[in-house]
Image (spheres, rainbow, N blue to C red):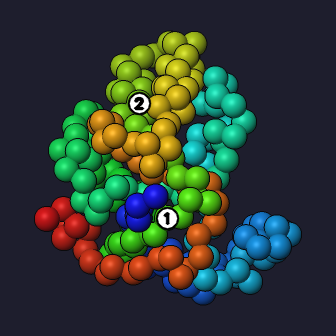
Amino acid sequence: MKQQVMYHYTNPKGWAGIANGQDGYVIEHPITKKMVDSETVKGWMIPHRRLIPQGIESSLVPWEATSPAIFGLPEPTPQSWMQYRDCINVWDYLLSCCKSGADKLALLKINLVDSDNSLVFDYVHIRRSARDLAQTKDPDRYRKILAEGNRDYWNSRVELNRYDGSFVLPEIVVFSAIPIERIEFLGERDRELFAA
């Protein structure tokens, strides 16, 4: 397998949490698999945001689709993400979520290995359902659109080593913890500078 990487945006606090541990959570330790206080786990990027939220969103997908994950992009500033527009500017939305109120963003390059079982999903399915959700007032239709969009997103997945570059908004997903030895800090900048 050729060297595979993904690029992950976070804020400075998120990067510090990877290096030094984060306060206030109980997590599964990546080695012992025991539940521990998060501040005791230093030097690991831990999956924390669910791929698909539990609830109506996950009614048409298997339980593993709601697992916590780490998300990344195939390149630092993918043109498809930067140019895609629907009811919002998707690139700006992505970076604002990563920024989480901080003044700056941090960009990380993550070296992936076979045991990560990295997958690629096409985020365009989430964007299309968001567009359709904005146009409906009927609660039953709303739930159907939400569940079907997440099902289509889940069904779009392909192994990273088989990905052919055909997705509109490719998103790399890993469901396992990643040690800091495989993470390279590429820099910290204002959000606007990542759009160049």
Is 177 on the left or on the right of 189, as rendered? right
Classify mark 1: helix, strand or loop.
strand
- Amino acid at circle 2: His
Most foreground residue, 186 or 138: 186
Q: Is residue 70 left or right of residue 130?
A: right
> Foreground residue, 113 or 35?
113
Query: Residue 107 appears at what percent x and percent y?
Result: 35, 72
Q: Which residue is mark 1?
A: 112
Residue depicted at 23% across the width and 44% down the height: 80
Return the x and y of residue 115 as percentages of the image width and height.
Answer: 62, 60
Instruction: Give the CA separation, mark 2 to mark 1.
Output: 25 Å
Q: Quadrant of residue 7?
A: bottom left
Q: Position of residue 120 (x, y in %)?
A: 45, 44
Marks 2 & 1, CB-CB < 8 Å contact: no
Label 2: which residue?
Answer: 125
Residue in the picture at 45% in, 69% down? 110
Front: mark 2 or 1? 1
- Residue found farthest to the right: 34
